[in-house]
Amino acid sequence: MEFLYDVFVFVHFASWALVFGGTIASMRTKALYKAVAHGAWGAVGAGIIMVGIAEMADLWADGGPSMAKIGVKLVVALGVAVTAQIAVRKGESVTSGLKGAVLGLTLLNILVAVFWH
């Protein structure tokens, strides 16, 4: 089970990298790349699966992260995914503010992951 958990950790990190890099790359274009929304939804799904596997296989026997942290990360990740989806549906008329919101929420999620112990 630990290997499966590690696979989803990789998918989770790769998805966030796609969101972060894709958003920065699309800052000079009129649209937000579709891969950003796909990456955001992939990160949400992988995160939920990671928590399920860890709880089921008792990988967090030492206590693991607090469920408050997991809840905050889920809410922020859903915010990223929904905002990215809205931006993708706008097509060529995406404002830089909407792209900035995707990028800012992504950075917030990373900050919560790193600094909330």
Image (cartoon, rainbow, N blue to C red):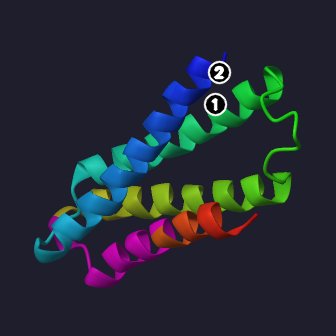
Q: Quadrant of residue 78?
A: bottom right
- Indicate whether residue 101 is drawn in magenta: yes
* Residue closest to the eye, 50 or 102: 50
Q: In this image, 96 relative to 102: left or right? A: left
Q: Quadrant of residue 30?
A: bottom left
102 is higher (above) or lower (below) than 17: below
**Which residue is located at x 54 percent, y 36 percent?**
46
- The magenta-colored residue range is 92-106
**Which residue is located at x 65 percent, y 37 percent?**
48
**Which residue is located at x 56 percent, y 57 percent?**
77
67 is higher (above) or lower (below) than 14: below
Name the chief secondary structure element in magenta. helix
Marker disc for residue 49 = 1
Mark 1 secondary-structure assignment: helix
**Whole-number angstrom distance, CA of label 1 to CA of label 2:** 13 Å
* Residue closest to the eye, 43 or 57: 57
17 is higher (above) or lower (below) than 45: below
Q: In this image, 52 relative to 49: left or right? A: right
Q: Percent from the top left, x then y, of residue 116?
A: 72, 67
**Which residue is located at x 77 percent, y 29 percent?**
59
* Residue closest to the eye, 92 or 54: 54
- Indicate whether residue 110 is drawn in magenta: no
Quick one: which residue is furthest to the front in this view? 62
Mark 2 secondary-structure assignment: helix
Q: Percent from the top left, x then y, of residue 32?
A: 23, 63
Q: Percent from the top left, x then y, of residue 113?
A: 62, 60
The residue that mark 2 highlights is: 2
